[in-house]
Image (cartoon, grey):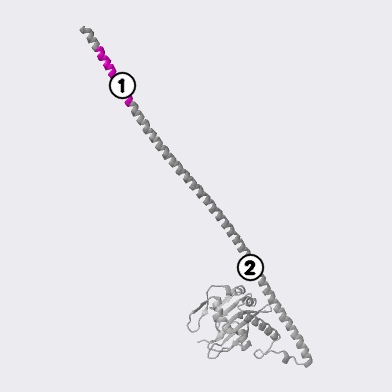
């Protein structure tokens, strides 16, 4: 009986061992499954987090694209505005060029008219001369005396063209003075010598080294010239006369009303009235002169004499010098 019991015990023990092993295996399987589930859950959570992060990045990228699109639209609008402004600028520049061309055309036409006016004045002077000569011949034939009716005393003598030269110079000088009165240097320019130009002298003593000479074209635009020039030396102080043409006109040319207030208008009779030695006849030996003298006002030593020098070229008299004799220290 003992042997079967032992066998039964051994079998029971084996069964128990097998049961324990089976139970152990089941427990291990359950533990493994739990670990796998945890890992899967963790992975899912990580995946969800990554998907959320991806969604956020995608949304941010979409916003950046919208911003970029908006900036591109703003850039296009700005480029369009720049193009419009460039077109406007081009149009303004074209208008400016057109206006300048029109202005130049008008200026050229004005110059031509001034030249034509000067020619007409010369023609009128010639006609007047012929008329006066004809009247003179008629009067001479009636009276039998030629010398008294037509002679003009030029420092004790006449020549055959005395009357003609005097009348031409007087007419031109009056035109120059009127132009100076009105600041109309376009008119003055029509009388300027085409080759020598005209010299401006602030006093009656002419200094050919210091005093400035301007051409006819420069005189025409003199009042628009804003450059400062040295015109000579101030009387008394010795300082340079540094002025724009407009300032020089005010202080050294039209200092008295020579057109309306001249008490004396002298032809080829230039004299020194003050301390300055008037040397225009030495500087312009080939010239004839017209002098417009205005006496001083009460209690003011402001007398002045405008001296105009004219020289002949091809039968015409042209302005070569403008000097103003005045009271000096």
Residue that label 1 marks: 25
Q: Position of residue 142 (x, y in %)?
A: 79, 92
Q: Given the current orientation, which residue lies at the most extreme front position?
A: 1
Residue that label 2 marks: 103
Quarter where residue 89 is shown? bottom right
**Going from the N terminus, do you reach mark 1 or mark 2 first?**
1
Visible in this render: residue 18? yes
Give the SS element for disc 2: helix
Residue 25 belongs to the span the image colors magenta: yes
Magenta stretch mostly in which secondary structure?
Answer: helix
Whether residue 166 sits left or right of residue 82 in the image: it is right
Whether residue 137 sits left or right of residue 52 in the image: it is right
Mark 2 Cα within 10 Å, few/some/many (few <14, many 20+)? few
Q: Position of residue 318 (x, y in %)?
A: 64, 79
Give the SS element for disc 1: helix
Q: Residue 154, labelled with which disc?
A: none
Q: Position of residue 136 (x, y in %)?
A: 75, 88
Q: Is 45 located above or below residue 212 in the figure?
A: above
Q: Residue at horizontal 62%, vertical 62%? A: 95
């Amino acid at each position: 009986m003992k042997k079967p019991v032992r066998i039964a015990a051994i079998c029971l023990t084996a069964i128990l061992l097998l049961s324990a092993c089976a139970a152990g295996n089941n427990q291990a399987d359950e533990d493994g499954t739990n670990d796998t589930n945890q890992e899967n859950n963790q992975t899912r959570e990580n995946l969800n987090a990554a998907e959320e992060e991806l969604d956020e990045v995608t949304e941010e990228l979409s916003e950046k694209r919208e911003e970029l699109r908006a900036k591109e639209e703003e850039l296009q609008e700005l480029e369009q505005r720049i193009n419009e402004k460039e077109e406007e600028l081009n149009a303004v520049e074209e208008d400016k060029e057109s206006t300048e061309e029109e202005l130049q055309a008008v200026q050229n036409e004005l110059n031509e008219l001034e030249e034509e006016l000067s020619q007409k004045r010369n023609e009128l002077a010639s006609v007047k001369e012929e008329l006066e000569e004809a009247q003179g011949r008629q009067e001479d034939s009636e009276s039998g005396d030629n010398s008294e009716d037509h002679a003009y005393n030029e420092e004790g003598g006449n020549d055959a063209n005395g009357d003609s030269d005097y009348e031409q110079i007087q007419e031109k000088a009056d035109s120059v003075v009127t132009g100076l009165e009105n600041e109309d240097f376009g008119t003055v320019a029509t009388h300027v010598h085409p080759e020598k130009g005209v010299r401006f002298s602030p006093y009656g003593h002419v200094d050919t080294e210091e005093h400035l000479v301007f051409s006819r074209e420069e005189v025409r635009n003199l009042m628009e010239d804003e450059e400062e020039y040295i015109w000579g030396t101030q009387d008394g102080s010795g300082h340079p006369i540094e002025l724009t043409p407009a300032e020089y006109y005010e202080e050294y040319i039209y200092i008295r009303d020579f057109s309306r207030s001249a008490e004396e208008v002298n032809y080829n009779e230039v004299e020194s009235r003050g301390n300055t030695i008037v040397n225009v006849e030495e500087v312009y030996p080939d010239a004839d002169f017209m002098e417009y003298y205005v006496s001083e006002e009460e209690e003011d030593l402001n007398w002045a004499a405008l001296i105009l020098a004219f020289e002949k070229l091809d039968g015409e008299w042209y302005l070569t010098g403008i000097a103003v004799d005045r009271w000096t220290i």
